[in-house]
Amino acid sequence: MSILKIAKFGHPILLKKTQEVKDIGSEKIKKIIYDMSETMLDYNGVGLAAPQVHINKSIFVFRNPENLKQDSNIEVSAIINPTIEKIGDEKNDDWEGCLSIPNMLGLVRRFSEIQYTGYDIFGNKLQVKAKGLHARIIQHEFDHLKGVLYTKRLAHRDAFGFENEIERYWKKKENEKK
Ligand code: NI
């Protein structure tokens, strides 16, 4: 396995639509997924999409927050050729970061509940319902496969900045309101 170089905000590959994977389950695709998983964990991310490591394919890996709570074992899931559908119209706003936009956060509006499909690393078809942080991660990573970064989905035009300033000026304000 190897740690891959991450494309940063401004790199054109982050704005391109990805290609569907035809050889699901092949050694080549498995290797890409193992490398992406290792890269995501090394950077301490919760999700990573193939374009972020300069690979123009419809694949992302993520850590399911529901599994994270249960034990300290870090379980990484891979989704190939995903589709996504909202369940209901409810949306919510929360802060997101991205390994391609280091040290920054944006307040992003996402659907609260979704259903997604795709294939796992072995080629098994998946159909999963997700809500909360799980649903948010999937929507963020799915967007990467469409060439969309979270900066395009800000809940508020000004709600974007460096982590430390967001913590100091935005999150503090939010907490005071509570
Ligand atoms: Ni991202």
Image (cartoon, rainbow, N blue to C red):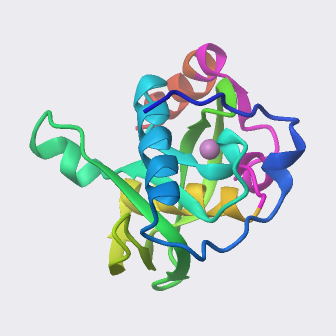
In the rendered structure, does residue 141 fall within the stretch colored magenta?
no
- Which of the 4 image quarters holds residue 122? bottom left
Q: Residue at x 45, y 84 (%)?
A: 87
Seen as rendered, the residue at the extreme front is: 27
Can residue 75 be seen here? The reply is: yes
Ligand 1 is found in the corner quadrant, namely top right
Q: Give the range drawn in magenta.
A: 147-166
115 or 22, which is in the foreground?
A: 22
Q: Position of residue 60 (x, y in %)?
A: 52, 56
Q: Which residue is drawn at 55% across and 80% down?
A: 83
Question: In this picture, is 56 found above or below 14?
Answer: below
Q: Position of residue 126 (x, y in %)?
A: 35, 79
Question: In this picture, is 78 found above or below 86?
Answer: above
Can residue 115 be seen here? The reply is: no
19 or 28, which is in the foreground?
A: 28
In the rendered structure, does residue 148 fall within the stretch colored magenta?
yes
- Is residue 48 found left or right of 7 in the rendered image? left
Q: Which residue is drawn at 41% across and 58% down?
A: 78
Q: Where is residue 113 in the image (x, y as percent from the top left)?
A: 42, 73
